[in-house]
């Protein structure tokens, strides 16, 4: 009989939120439990007890980051009863992605996405694939005729363009140029 993990305790949730804030500024690649624990007011032993392992903590952090993304997707996806249209939703996504307060989350996403490609057997698991699927579902819901091959190709192209522009923005900080490129693409 499969067992389900009990709901996280208040302390586990509190430490996860603190670890999440820490990881947004320090990243995950070189995450070490001792400095993390010190920074968030805990100990490595407590973190290991609560999350099972460093990989368990990383998985929890990735789930936490994904929760932020999914909240956006639900918010944008539920805005209208009728599909808003791919261009409208793409613009909303771009506005959300480039907000200065989300830069740490976006850098976190890039790191986790990249790690999921080079270390798919680790705690990063299927992170990259699942985020692609999540965003494609939102874009699909924005299309009036989503089941055609042309619609599938267009939403894939829009997703690729948004993510490429985001990578460029994160690397250069040039919001004006990258936004102009997004707008130019969406005019087609």
Image (spheres, rainbow, N blue to C red):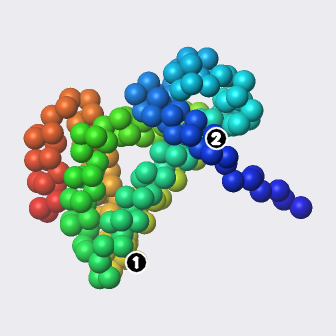
Q: Quadrant of residue 156?
A: bottom left
Query: x, y percentage for residue 61?
Result: 55, 39
Image position of 29 with respect to 87: above or below: above
- Tell me the SS state at disc 2: helix
Kindly tell me whether residue 34 is visible in this rendering: yes
Front position among marks 1 and 2: 2
Q: Residues within 10 Å of mark 2 (few under 14, many from 20)?
A: some
Query: What residue sits 11% from the left and 54% below the top?
Result: 184
The residue pinned by badge 1 equals: 147
Question: Which of the marked residues, 1 or 2, is nearer the chain's N terminus?
Answer: 2
| Closest to the observer, 5 or 150 | 5
Q: Position of residue 155 (x, y in %)?
A: 33, 63
Q: Which image quadrant for residue 122?
A: top right
Q: In this image, 126 relative to 153: left or right?
A: right
Q: Position of residue 23 (x, y in %)?
A: 47, 30
Q: Quadrant of residue 101?
A: top left
Residue at image point 42% right, 59% down: 71
3D distance between C-alphas at marks 1 and 2: 42 Å
Q: Residue at x 63, y 40 (%)?
A: 11
Asked if residue 129 lies left or right of residue 109, the reply is right
Indicate the quadrant containing the C terminus: top left, top right, bottom left or bottom right: bottom left
Position of the N terminus, as image quadrant, is: bottom right
Going 69% across and 37% down the picture, which residue do you hit? 51
Crowding at dot 1, Cα within 10 Å, few <14 / some 14-19 / many 20+, comes out as: few
Q: Position of residue 99 (x, y in %)?
A: 24, 45
Residue 149 vs 29, above or below: the answer is below
In the structure shown, which secondary structural element does the residue marked by tag 1 occupy? Answer: loop
Q: Are marks 1 and 2 in contact (CB under 8 Å)?
A: no
Looking at the picture, does residue 110 appear above or below residue 155? above
Asked if residue 120 shows in the view, the reply is no
**Residue receiving disc 2:** 12
């Amino acid at each position: 009989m499969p067992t389900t993990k009990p709901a996280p305790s208040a302390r586990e949730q509190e430490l996860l939120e603190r670890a999440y804030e820490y990881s947004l500024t320090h990243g995950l690649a070189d995450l070490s439990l001792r400095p993390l624990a010190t920074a968030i007011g805990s100990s490595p032993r407590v973190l290991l007890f609560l999350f099972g392992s460093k990989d368990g903590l990383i998985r929890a952090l990735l789930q936490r980051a994904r929760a932020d993304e999914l909240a956006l997707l639900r918010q944008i996806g539920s805005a209208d009863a009728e599909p808003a249209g791919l261009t409208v939703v793409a613009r909303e996504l771009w506005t959300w992605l480039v907000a200065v307060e989300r830069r740490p989350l976006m850098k976190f996403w890039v790191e986790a996405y990249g790690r999921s490609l080079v270390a798919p057997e680790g705690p990063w698991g299927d992170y990259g694939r699942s985020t692609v699927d999540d965003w494609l579902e939102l874009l699909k819901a924005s299309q009036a005729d989503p089941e055609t091959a042309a619609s599938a190709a267009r939403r894939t192209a829009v997703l690729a363009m948004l993510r490429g522009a985001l990578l460029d923005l994160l690397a250069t900080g040039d919001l004006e140029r990258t936004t102009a490129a997004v707008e130019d693409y969406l005019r087609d």
